Amino acid sequence: MTTELVLLGTAGAPMPVADRAGISSAFIIADRVFVIDCGRGSPSAFANAGLGFPRLEAVFLTHLHADHTGDLAGMLLYPWGVRVGDNGPLPPVRVYGPPRPEAMPEGDATFHRETTIHPELPAPGTTDLVENILAGYAYHLNVMPLDARMPDAGALVRAIDVPVPARTESVTQSPVAVFEDGVVRVTAVAVTHGRAVPALGYRFDTADGSVVFSGDTTVNDDLIALAQGADILVHHVADLGYLERHGMTGAALQRMAALHTDVTEVGDVAERARVRELILSHYLPAQPDAITDAEWAERAAQGFSGTTTAGRDGLRRSLPRGAS
Ligand SMILES: [Zn+2]
């Protein structure tokens, strides 16, 4: 049995950059594939990694910003035709993610929206998102089967909102059980990513080891608790100093700091979580030529006694430790 992590894309923020795909990772257990976030290029990266689309079992969204969800529609719709086995359609791809927020996030004098889009449901959750993808692509789903043999569209996807309780500042959260069978257990906690509420970090536990995905977050004690003793922590990282040197100042820089973990902080996060390996992903800045892998890794490793690796698109890690 192979248990493996693959980084499908490692860019942070919605703006496309050359030579680095949007944030997305895959966790593989034997013939089952779980995808964490579906950023830009995720379906192509899935194919490049040699993962067969019939193996896709579930998608886990950390939060509902477009850089994490933009290619979810493609991840469901492009491979629809192969979602079929000997006995009819394969089980639906399950899409787990944040529910609707309890209250619509409000802005302030500096950062606020002008037009509210779709005011009747201005902050849809994961099940709403999937329902709207199906509604928006109803033409394809209803008309394509008239010209090609397609599995029943009704069996394509099933969305599940992860029932995270609202975070209360300085109150410790217990992880929420997202999914469990005899082989894999997935748990989640709410992390802190500005007004993106709720935002989630996920932990995957198997007999071969455990991998934690931070999602986008500031330094967060609940995430550190979730990641305790994990084999691998895939953590997003920002270089706020770089952003400042390249023109981001004042309130915009402060807000970035309230959204992200800086490269100077992430080593301490990994040390406190006592993980074996820290793998960097979701880079800000995202351009591969902005900061070298070696520089990212060297700076992130400060204060961490384990192994630090600068993640890149296509990076693979097998579990358990020492497996090829
Ligand atoms: Zn992001």
Image: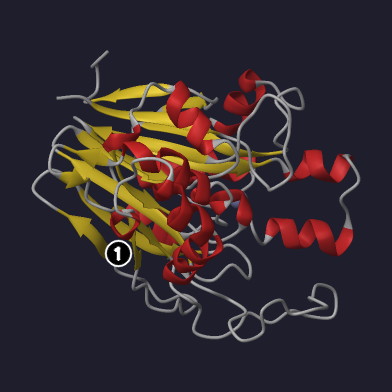
Amino acid tagged 1: Pro
Q: Position of residue 195 (x, y in %)?
A: 63, 71
Residue count near mark 1 (Cα–Cα under 10 Å), binned few <14, some 14–19, many ≥20 = many
Which residue is label 1 attached to?
175
Q: Is residue 51 above or below residue 188?
A: above
Residue 275 in sight in this render: no
Q: Residue at x 54, y 71 (%)?
A: 197
Look at the picture and state if 234 lies above or below 18. Answer: below
Where residue 100 appears, x then y in whole percent? 48, 76
Q: Locate the C terminus and report the quarter of the image it occupies.
A: top left
Please indicate whether residue 176 sits to the left or right of residue 137 in the image.
Answer: left
Q: Report the residue at 39% width, 22% height from top.
A: 316
SS at badge 1: loop
Residue 151 in the image: above or below residue 131: above
**Which residue is rendered at x = 78% and y = 80% of the image?**
108
Residue drawn 59% across the image and 50% down it:
70
Give the total number of marks visible in the rendering: 1
Q: Residue furthest right?
A: 247
Q: Is residue 109 visible?
A: yes
Q: Is residue 117 left or right of residue 309?
A: right
Residue 74, x across and y down, in percent: 51, 45
Q: Position of residue 140 (x, y in %)?
A: 50, 52
Quarter holding the N terminus?
top left
Disc 1 Cβ-to-ligand 1 distance below 8 Å: no
